[in-house]
Amino acid sequence: MDRRLFVLRHAKSSWDDPSLADHDRPLNDRGRDALPKLQRALMEHTDAIDVALCSSAARTLATLDGVRGALREDVEVVVDTELYGASGQTWLERCRELDDEVGGALLVGHNPGLEDLIAELTGSGEAEALDQLAAKVPTGALACCSFDGSWHQLVADSCHLDALLIPKRLP
């Protein structure tokens, strides 16, 4: 497979302060505890990630910051307010705009948009990962996908779901 797509749903967020706008909610203890596991999982893909696209919400920024150690220093990070609560279609359009020099991208965002994106793009995959996708993509889940072709050619069922990693199952 030519390209890699890593789709990371933000880690578990806090609902402790009802006065905070949804956009401003931080991670809770469980979410912060998941970050080292997610970073370790991404470490084996360090060389595959050239760009990170991230929602502007506090919890997605904290999630990206928590896994940043798995990314090379030259990875381009794009924080975009339009990705906050974005649909799967919006995420797909952003991926299709990536330059063909980009071999791999990390997306950090929210459900239902990210789950919709993964479900639409993955036409094949590892059985366990597909079963988890059909059940639910929980907070902190990391989908690892691969596909042939250029970014603008991304269409339904064009990706292989290599893994769907859940923090509570990671060492």
Image (cartoon, rainbow, N blue to C red):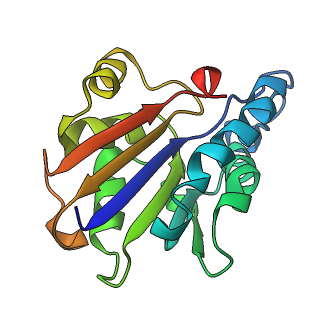
Instruction: Work out whether 157 lies above or below 45.
Output: above
> Would you say residue 18 is visible in this rendering?
no
Q: Quadrant of the C terminus?
A: top right
Residue drawn 50% across the image and 59% down it: 82
- Extreme-top residue of the structure: 135
The residue nearer to you, when weighing 48 against 21, is: 48
Q: Quadrant of residue 148?
A: bottom left
Residue drawn 79% across the image and 38% down it: 26
> Would you say residue 135 is visible in this rendering?
yes
- Residue 120 position, x and y percent, is 21, 40
Q: Quadrant of residue 125?
A: top left
- Residue 71 position, x and y percent, is 63, 65
Instruction: Work out whether 30 lies above or below 74.
Output: above
The residue nearer to you, when weighing 122 against 18, is: 122
Describe residue 153's horizontal placement relative to residue 165 as left or right. left
Residue drawn 37% across the image and 56% down it: 5
Q: Quadrant of the N terminus?
A: bottom left
Instruction: Work out whether 67 lies above or below 143.
Output: below
Q: How many marks?
A: 0
- Residue 88 position, x and y percent, is 32, 45
